[in-house]
Image (cartoon, helix red, strand yellow):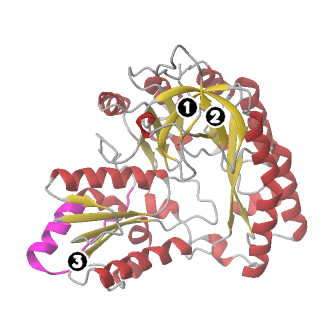
Amino acid sequence: MRAAFYTLGCKVNQYETQILEQLFFDNGFDIVSPDSPADLLVVNSCTVTAEGDRKTRQALRRFKRANPSGVAALTGCFPQAFPDIAEQIPEADVITGSRNRGSLLCAVEKYFATGRRVIEITPHERGEEFERMKAGRFLGRTRAFVKIQDGCDRYCSYCIIPTARGPVRSKPLEELREELEGLAAAGYREAVLVGINLPFYGKETGYTPRLIDAIELACAVPGIERVRLGSLEPELLTEEDIARMAAQPKFCPQFHLSLQSGCDNTLRRMNRHYTAAEYRAIVDKLRAAFDNPAITTDIIVGFPGETPEEFAQSLAFAREIGFAKVHVFPYSKREGTRAAKLPGQIPRAVKSERVAELAQAVEPARRAFLQAQVGRTEAVLFESAAAQGGVEGYTKNYAPVRVPGAGGELSGRVFAVEIVGVGEDCCLGRLAPNQGNPEIFSD
């Protein structure tokens, strides 16, 4: 029986989909791409924006048109946050929430046995434990995502995630060690520690342990040669944490610090827990502690009440920081959040104009970051063949590098590369003449 998986959203969702793929594969399913004919489609949904909901419905409809007798399963954040709406989607034969993810296989088997729709959505509750899951392999990937934290209680005014993901909970260190040892034995060189709100790792136990303890443990696992972090909320990074990270040779100096706005008035309406000045101070500390770090971010434009002057402040702040990359999003109204009821909702056309203006404004910093890599020799983890020819991969600070003329045999391996130029949104490199350039590790 053929099963396809379609994932929307963050790296946590990607990790969880890989766990589900592994579970279904181990129970006799052949895993195929979402575009292939299949007996089952699993949509692991994201509900951060209304666009995510639309793509979820679209994927289910498309699958049913192409596979009329196939079974469609909907899981993840969308049904967890909006169970009544999810139940109204006629194409979904099986619906589970993010808390019922572990029982998805049983729910699908129940549908195949009875032909009757299965809906299992259990609300989150205080005190629930971290969901036990362990990745053993990641189909088609050279780096391994490892979820170490789930849930959030920050309640940013625009965000539905606390409803979709529940309270803060963290993976025990011993379980993390066991998972990483298994991934190292499977040949993975790089582990990316991900979570819904990573700096809250250990909060439910009084920050004993903390995120830095998980980082140090990961760096100590033999065979794991790189340790990278997923998206971070900036305000919980302390000077001690930064110093301890910088002391780890395997740690990758790439920090995706979610900004959302460079204007203090907007940050207050968003219920973010830092000011632009505090954010700038954290960036300065990271740049002082690490050689050649990359600072990337997300910025929302068109938040309710954002005046032209406030947008200009945010744009100027983004220019000032000089991000290696910025993901720019128009504000998306989410029912069930406080921001959905705020006055001063911005017209779609204005949001589109601001997205384009900000994206253009931060592009020079992106090019400057790539240009700053030229002349350096960096360890590159190669991943796949490049569309323009050659092979492409990433440095420790996540600068994309393409090596023209190199072959696919480099995929999944780490080599020294001399950065010699800049192409279209990537660096250009050549294998360093290092005694025939044997494979090296990043430490």
Residue that appears at 63% across and 22% down? 246
- Where is mark 1, residue-wise? 380
Task: Judge from the rendering whether residue 244 lies leftward or rightward of residue 94; answer left or right.
Answer: right
Q: Is residue 230 visible?
A: yes
Label 3, label 2: how many angstroms apart (C-alpha)?
A: 46 Å
Region of the chain picked out in magenta, as a range: 104-125
Which numbered disc covers residue 70?
Answer: 3
| Numbered disc 2: secondary structure | strand
Nearer the observer: mark 3 or 2; the answer is: 2
Is residue 108 magenta-colored?
yes
> Disc 2 or 1, which lies upstream in sequence?
1
Residue nearer the viewer, 64 or 100: 64
**Residue 158 location (% of width, % of height):** 63, 66
Q: Amino acid at mark 1?
A: Val
**Residue 349 location (% of width, % of height):** 76, 81
Residue that appears at 72% across and 33% down? 373
Which numbered disc covers residue 429?
Answer: 2
